[in-house]
Amino acid sequence: MPSFFILAFSMVAWAREEDKNEIVVGVGRHRDISKDATIPRGNKARKLSDFSFDLGGASLIERNVTRKLMNYNSLVSAQTKAWYPREQAPNLGIENGDFVIKVRPPNAPPIFYVNHPFERYLNNRSRNLEGNVVASEDVDLIVDPFQPLRIHVHTSSLLKVGAQNNALYRKRIDFLVNSVLPATKRRWSEALRVVPVQGALRLLGWCPETPSKHIHEGVTGADLILYVNGNGKYCQQGTLAYASACELDQYDRPIAGSITFCLDTIDLGENNWVSQITLETTVETAVHEVAHILAFSDLLMPYFRKPENGEPLTPRYIDGTPVESIRTCIDGTTKYGHLPSDRTVKEGVTASGARFFEVVTPRVATVSRNQFDCQKMAGARLENQPTSQSCFGAHWDERLFYASTMSAVAEYTAGYLDPVTLALFEDSGWYKADYSVAEMSPFGHGAGCSFVYDDCIVNEEIPSYSKGYFCNSPLSIRNGLVEDGTFFCDHSHRSIAMCDMVDVTKISGGQLPPKEFSYFNQNVMAGLMQQIDYCPISSLYNFYCADSINANTKFALTGEYFGEDSKCFNTDISGKPMCLRSRCNEDKNVVEVLVEDTVITCNEDFEMHFSAIIGRSIECPRKSAVCPELFCPANCAGRGRCDFSLVHPRCICFDENDTRPGCFESNSAFANNVHSHGESLVASLALRSSSDKKFTPRKLIASALGAILSFIMLR
């Protein structure tokens, strides 16, 4: 069996170019937005310069970010909020030698660990093919061997790029080295723990930038070495960054990866000053890309292991590579190769006939059910719209996980490093997550199974489960220009946003949505984003309520408040939402709105309260969206069920001895977890599909990977 090469390649792409005036759909047509461009809050914006829309290009200037319309191969720009596709380039495959890694060979020196749980389960020892002891030291530790993830950042290649270029490049590199990378390291070190490498981490040299010192002497105090470069060969068409894992340890955990930042796309703003928006979006981009290195990759999923004992979730050959299988990919093509088994990823079909794949590992499944209050969910759905050449998706599905850091499309504001993402890292078997740092996503939170399984728009109307998340107010477009639009609060109530519903026949190059994603009778109306299954959403942003600068603009309304504790509230005047001070009252379990000195208490979702100060009624938001912290912390960390039926929803931990609100002390994540069909989740995941009859399970002796590998041999 030949060694298996894998490539975990991911990209963030932003298209940029100098000013173009045409409004023409097509790849490569770009237009920068004027920095002082604004979107009037009224309903009578008639000029392109008012809206800063460009249906044919993209740009990023400080707070003006663009969003890619994958369904029309075009881009729309809005003043203060936008989205962009994270990965644009195709998966380059094994024929490209830049980011290729292979399973650690049997004769390679193992990474040294102390008391690794995978080995302790397997009699604490394993032997290589020559009979020599390889693997970690046998030490019985009472304490948890997992410690915060240590990332060593190697920037020599990046600094060389700065030395060879102008002062502007050096300023951007300084921004990355001193601001972005430390924040990214800190984020992942707080979120994940690993069994630490003992002594120096010595590599085999499979990463392109690996210096000889890292091979012969190694790096001390590191569990992952991150090689950082600038302006690689894939930095075309405005790509912001791309990353890849490039070396694994004997348990298949990535121990080295490469990330390249495309320096030309980092906007320093006026006077070479980096705005807070640029910092936040660049850090989130780095966090997203490092996630692909750590575990969140369709090409790493075949290597996932059971956290309890290290048993591979996908059967292995004797050399450690996953057995080949065949699947019909999300785009309809057939792929044969090393793919994750049904214990990790399964295929499903929506009620309207759309295919999808979903991660069905225990913690991911449990967290997903708690996120949406839908206990019949089998797992977390992956993106079902093609965003790369991944067979089954390498991001969470935009339709369900729109706000997640690991969705396929990024928001203007930083996404949420949500519990379901941390659950996937735990289910890889390589990490333990600290759910106290998880950020609860407001999108679809507690909305029920109808939100998950039914259409976002029904009979052209917004059903109750979609209210606050989707919209049905079309943009008015004439001669390719936006004339009119309706503002609402966005899903998180952090911003005032415009509904992106549009008549696709009025856009050059517009395409009708597929029938399974057609929500309107004439089939010409759709949301702008293909990844969200063409559901219209309030995503074209104007005002960010936390931005205090907006208080001094001519668009601020009487009684409005802009600041860190401000949220968006819809009112009884159509298209006139307001930013108001609010707070989540944990004692009363309610949302409170402060209009000057008056406190308005929201006891129920969507109830109306009149305020004489502002002269209109305020609509109360979904409490689960505005104050997700009032519900089950971190979706019960994959270790319990969130009971939404209670007045104060709380976690029912599977471990009855765990009394913490988020089940953070539970030893088991799925001891009492039950599928909707009544079977034990552990039992169902332990069984292979009965329809797969071409493989026979075998037990193997100790291997040089440092663990006894379970596999299934071809007959």
Image (cartoon, rainbow, N blue to C red):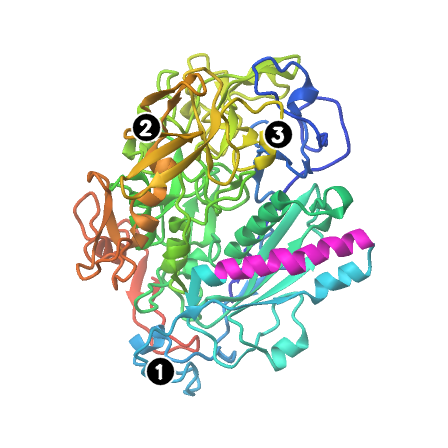
The label on residue 555 is none
Alpha carbons under labels 3 and 2: distance apart: 36 Å
The part of the image, by quadrant, that contains residue 128 is: bottom left
Q: Which residues are magenta?
A: 167-188
Secondary structure of residue under mark 3: helix
Characterize the magenta stretch by its predominant secondary structure. Answer: helix
SS category of the residue bearing label 1:
loop
Disc 1 and disc 3 in contact, CB within 8 angstroms: no
Mark 3: which amino acid?
A: Asn
The amino acid sitting under disc 2 is Tyr
Q: Is residue 210 above or below residue 47?
A: below
Give the mark, 1 or 2, whose residue is nearer the N terminus: 1
**Picture coordinates of residue 572, whole percent (x, y):** 41, 16
Give the residue number, with chain letter if any, for mark 1: 125
Residue lying at 27% horizontally and 56% vertically, measured from the top left: 663
Q: CA distance from mark 1 to mark 3?
A: 67 Å
Front-most of 325 and 173?
173
**Which secondary structure, mark 2?**
helix
Q: Are marks 3 and 2 in contact (CB under 8 Å)?
A: no
**Disc number placed over residue 465 in the picture, else none:** 2
Q: Is residue 185 magenta?
A: yes
